[in-house]
Image: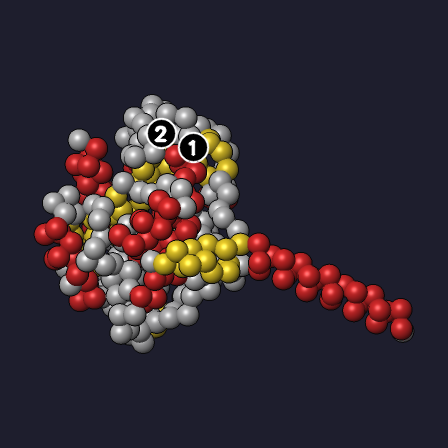
Amino acid sequence: MKNCLLLVATALFFLFQAESTFAKQFEIPKFESGSSKLVKEKFADLSFTGPFSKGEEFSVADNPILLPPSMIGAAVVIVPGCTGVQSYNENDMLRWSEVFLAEGYVVAIVNPTISPRPKKNCGGKKSQSASRGVKDIYDAVTAAASIDGVDKTKIFVIGFSLGAQNGAKAIWQKNIDVAVKNELATPAGVIGIYGGCQYGDGRPSKKYVYKDTILPLLWLMGGKDTEAPPKSCRVLKAINKKNKLSQSHLYKGATHCWDCKGLDGFKKKAGNGDPVIYKFDAEVTKDSEKRALSFISSILN
């Protein structure tokens, strides 16, 4: 009995040591407030697989980098919402990747550092910190920049829901300054699909889109989106006025997750307490793809 207790105690000691080391091992800038102060993180930097050419097998969940048949020297990072990559959105991520691959863009699909992973409903409490979400963006852009033939100044981010919000926060002036100081690659522009701009009282940790967003931003919203209501995005007017390449558009009849085939009809209560229903809209999805390509082209040209 004593030997068993000793073994358990020893195992717990080493587990505690490992956890302590793990917690101390990862420190990143406090991106939720645009501060160079370091904060402890339980997640390491993202690692990517590939690159994969057409026909090669890969897992969407393993942060793959995909190569187009013919490269144009630019890349697109795709960032899903707060649940990360799941069985019901894998095909949506692949569909979006094909949109960009067909135009010659290298594509990196991000499976964010989230644990535990919510199945469908993230609610108001997220297991990913605001800082780690922004760092995921920089990690992905840095990975895309490492591919031969990709110009590091021509890497774009398209994010969905929380992915859009983290993407927007990654081009906030204060975070760009911190990223450059830490020698992290940054996006040339961000496309936000049904993301919210601000929640609650507007404290830094609940704000994603800032007036001093210094790089081009395309923000697409749904008029019937109760999860990320367009009314939270009044800041876009100032951004669009300041940056001629920035744009925003409202699809009046669209709900949150209008491109989510696998979640068509899904119902839940959002983090703000409002009821939510997702309705897949093929027409709005197709228009979103066209606007995304046009936005990137306007920056490259």
- The reply, left or right, for residue 285 in relation to residue 92 is left
**Amino acid, disc 1:** Ser
- The reply, left or right, for residue 281 in relation to residue 63 is left
- The reply, left or right, for residue 269 in relation to residue 116 is left
Q: Which label belongs to residue 150?
A: 2
- In the rendered image, residue 69, in percent from the top left (x then y), is placed at 36, 24
Query: Could you say which is closer to the camera, residue 19 or residue 86?
Result: 19
**Amino acid, disc 2:** Val
Query: In the figure, residue 273 lies in which quadrant?
Result: bottom left
Q: Which label belongs to residue 207?
A: none
Q: Which label belongs to residue 146?
A: 1
Query: Could you say which is closer to the camera, residue 177 or residue 96?
Result: 177
**Kind of element beneath mark 2:** loop
Report, in whole angstroms, how far the alpha carbon at label 1 lies from the one at label 2.
Answer: 7 Å
Q: Residue at x 50, y 59 (%)?
A: 41
Q: Residues within 10 Å of mark 2 (few under 14, many from 20)?
A: some
Residue 226 visible within the image: yes
Q: Residue at x 36, y 58 (%)?
A: 35
Residue 109 visible within the image: no
Q: Residue at x 26, y 70 (%)?
A: 202
Q: Indicate whether 275 appears above or below 178.
A: below
Q: Residue lying farthest left?
A: 241
> Cβ–Cβ below 8 Å for labels 1 and 2?
yes
Q: Quadrant of the N terminus?
A: bottom right
- In the rendered image, residue 224, in percent from the top left (x then y), is placed at 20, 64
